[in-house]
Image (spheres, rainbow, N blue to C red):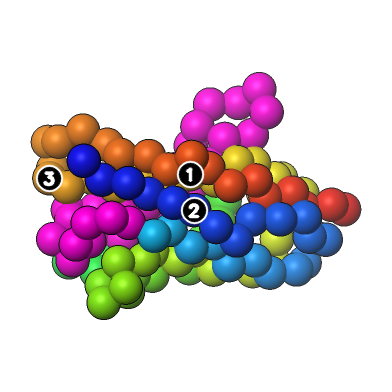
Amino acid sequence: QVQLVESGGGLVQAGDSLRLSCAASGNISRFFRMGWYRQAPGKQRELVAHIFITDSTNYADSVKGRFTISRDNTKNTVTLQMDSLKPEDTAVYYCNAKRFPISGDYWGQGTQVTVSS
C-alpha cells in the first residue's frame, strides 16, 4: 500500500506561481511512474504531468512550458512547479503513483488550486 499526501495548493492570481508537493510512503525511486492529475468542477480528471523511473517526463499540452515535474528520491517526494498560472488551471490536483507498468494506481486526497483573473 502506498500513501500519498499532497500539499501546497491555494488561491493565487493569474500569472503567479505555486509549488505542489507530494510525499509518498514508499521508495519512489523504484516506482515505474509518478504523476499529477487535476479535476475541475464538472470535468473529468486529466493528466497534468508524469515522471518515469527513467526520469523522462511528459506533460499535457495545456501546461507545457509552464509546469515542471520533478522528483527527490532521497525524500520520496514529487513536486509540481506551476508558473504563469491561468484561471483555467483552477482544479483539484491529485498526486498519482504507479509501482509497476501493469499495477493499479495510488492516489492522494487532492489539493485545491484556485487561480483568479
- At x 67%, y 50%, the residue is 113
Which residue is the site of mark 3? 100
| Camera-side mark, 3 or 2 | 2
Q: Secondary structure at mark 3?
A: loop
Q: From which residue to which does the magenta span run?
A: 24-52
Residue 72 lies, in percent from the top left, at: 32, 74
Q: Residues within 10 Å of mark 1 (few under 14, many from 20)?
A: many
Q: Split into 4 quadrants, where in the image is the N terminus?
A: top left
Which label is found at residue 6? 2
Is 100 positioned to the left or the right of 8 in the image? left
| Residue highlighted by disc 1 | 94
Judged left or right of residue 64, residue 23 is left
Identify the element where label 1 is drawn.
Answer: strand
Q: Is residue 37 above or below residue 22?
A: above
Q: Is residue 66 visible?
A: no
Tell me which amino acid carries mark 1: Tyr
Query: Sequence-wise, which precedes: disc 3 or disc 1?
Result: 1
- Residue 67 circle label: none
From the top left corner, tell me how far across and down residue 77 is, in percent. 36, 66
Disc nearest the viewer among 1 and 2: 2
Q: Earlier in the sequence, mark 3 or mark 2?
A: 2
Q: Secondary structure at mark 2?
A: strand
The amino acid marked with disc number 2 is Glu
Q: Residue type at mark 3?
A: Phe
Residue located at (43% from left, 58% from top): 22
Q: Earlier in the sequence, mark 1 or mark 2?
A: 2
Mark pair 3, 1: CA separation: 19 Å
Residue 93 appears anywhere in the view: yes
Residue that protrudes farthest toward the top in the picture = 42
Q: What residue occupies the far right of the structure in this picture? A: 117
